[in-house]
Image: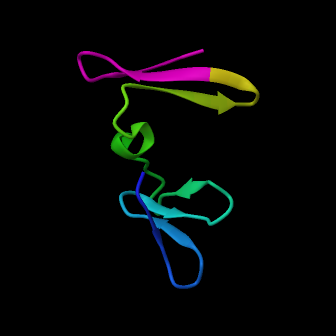
Amino acid sequence: MHVIPKPDGETSDAASGRQDAGEGRCFAPDGVIRTASLMSGRREVIILHAGERYRLRITANDKLILTK
């Protein structure tokens, strides 16, 4: 994800919205997060939710699969 600094110290994600400086959370103005931004060129990522690990991967058929 490419982050662009703004003059007021807040940072902005060029592809999908803005990022709050210091918080590490990404906010898309329309609630949409693009897979290109989320995956950063990888085919698989691990998502931590409520203390559990989930695996999000892109299949050979370009579909998304989320498993625990």
Q: Which of the 4 image quarters holds residue 51? A: top right
56 in relation to 20, above or below = above
Q: Is residue 58 magenta?
A: yes
**Relative vertical location of residue 66 with respect to residue 37 in this rendering, above or below:** above
Please state the extent of the stretch shown in magenta in the rendering.
Answer: 54-68
Number of marks in the image? Answer: 0
Furthest residue in direction right, as rendered: 51
Q: Position of residue 47 (x, y in %)?
A: 59, 30
Instruction: Tell which of 8 and 51 is nearer to you.
Output: 8
Q: Residue at x 44, y 41 (%)?
A: 38
Which quarter shows the C terminus?
top right
* Residue for point 41% across, 36% down: 39
Q: 64 left or right of 31?
A: left
Q: Residue at x 36, y 25 (%)?
A: 43
Image height of 16 relative to 49, above or below: below
Render colour scheme: rainbow
In the rendered image, the residue lying farthest to the bottom is 7
| Prevailing secondary structure class for the magenta stretch in the rendered image | strand
Q: Determine if the magenta segment contains residue 28.
A: no
- From the viewer's perspective, is residue 36 above or below residue 4? above
* Place of residue 55 in the rendered image (x, y in percent of width and height, measured from the top left): 53, 20
Residue 46 in picture, x, y percent from top left? 55, 26
Task: Please tell me which residue is depicted at 36% across the width and 58% down the height of the picture.
Answer: 15
